[in-house]
Amino acid sequence: MTIIDKSIFILGLGISGMSLARKLNFRKINCWDDNSKIRDLAKREKLDIKEPNLDNLKITDFLVLSSGINHELANPHNAIVIAKSLGIPIISDIELIHLLELKNYLIGITGTNGKSSTTKFITDSLRHKNFLDSQACGNIGIPFTELEIKDDSVLVIECSSFQLSKIINLRFHISILLNISSDHIDWHKTFKNYINSKEKIFKNQTSSDHAIICIDDKICNNIAGQFKKKYKSNLIKISVKKKITDGIFLKESKSYITIINSISKDIIKIDKKSINLPITKANLQNLLTTYTVSFILKQNTEFFIASLKNIKALKHRMEYIGKYKNISFFNDSKSTNVNSSISAIESYKNIFWILGGRKKIGGLSGVEKKLTNVLKSFTFGESGQEFKKFMEKCGIHSTYNKNLEKTIHEATKEASQEKEQINIIFSPCASSFDQFKNFEERGNFFKKIVRKRVKIEK
């Protein structure tokens, strides 16, 4: 049976759901969103809107959920209850890559932090000199249904744990696991469930496929250690922290980044001046992962090195805003958890750290031993007072303002009175949902205030 013969029910018409509905808009597709305004929009686009009841679902072959809809809740959406009672497979949008029988080479990327940047780095590198027609999609914000996919296109897919939790048959030719730390526990309920979702990226790989795991955190190191017992693909371990004799690792000096490939015995030396990126721990991991994909796909090493000149950091990921007097400003609004913010504050000296928002489970726990470079902290928002007390217990002078704008002014004022160079790093270590609708809006607000109040010298 081909996809044309199957009946699809799409629940949730966000960006990916709406795009998928347009792509598959044939007679056996039905759609629903609980938001009546979105349903009205879908009707104007001549999509078939049907309420998800027993009559409409009993003829359905697949229930496609928006990635944020949790199908494992104790009291899930009624459509999920009905689908489970009827034995209907529940999938996310990326599973349709398999159902549409696309024959493209697939690279899947997951991890708690760094997924989007790594997706972009790999895509940009493989495009250099037209080596491959690589296209980024998935959780990075571009549904695969929005792409003009050629037969030889390589799809570089950022995969969230929400999407991976619903994988059935989708197979990645290269699966990448960057890191795992506690996150989205409110969605997955337990840390073990979250880890299991991440591991599903390796689920359907064969002996001709490759897996890349960065072993720099304990969880990923354990997964790599048990890998051969559970999965069929060829594992390549990577590290930016330690030497490994059966994988690929990276060393950093003042002027150079050196990649040592213990598999091929190659040594790749890269001048930092040739990279248009902040040299953070996260970006080193992103670059090492990009090289490893390049190695698997047999890209010319010189072409890989040359491609790094064209790679730029994504917005809101240690994004350099500019310099004013003795102050450099960095927007790291995407950092919503401890591990991501640790990467930021370990990357520069003399830091004035702006943090706050709606705290995640665990709060700032884990950051206390990583504050060597932080001179002062400036907290804001829903978690601001709690974060202030935490930082003061760690011996860091801290100032609290409920309002982010006032926090930025306070940090800038105090930084301008210092004799040394100061790095103001906006790395919230919390979600944005107390004052903003998402991290992009929060990051754009930070940039707007900085550019409005101080004359940025780029």
Image (cartoon, rainbow, N blue to C red):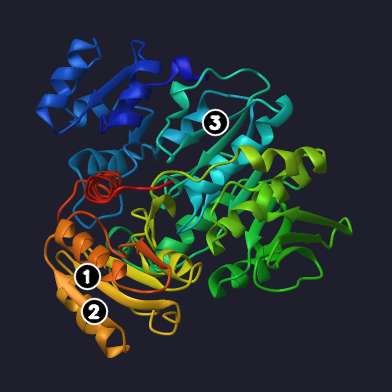
Badge 3: residue crowd in 10 Å (few <14, some 14–19, many ≥20)? some
> Quick check: marks 2 and 1 in contact, CB under 8 Å?
yes
Give the labeled residue for mark 3.
98
**Point 30% across, 54% down: residue:** 72
**Point 56% across, 20% down: residue:** 149
Q: How many marks?
A: 3
In this picture, residue 9 sits left or right of residue 91: left
Rendered image quadrant of residue 213: bottom right
Rendered image quadrant of residue 432: bottom left
Q: Which mark is residue 398?
A: 2
Give the labeled residue for mark 1.
379
Q: Could you tell me if residue 317 is visible in this image?
A: no
Q: Is residue 168 above or below residue 398?
A: above
In this picture, residue 432 sits left or right of residue 122: left
In this picture, residue 242 sits left or right of residue 176: right
Q: Position of residue 448 (x, y in %)?
A: 25, 44
Which comes sooner in the sequence, label 3 or label 2?
A: 3
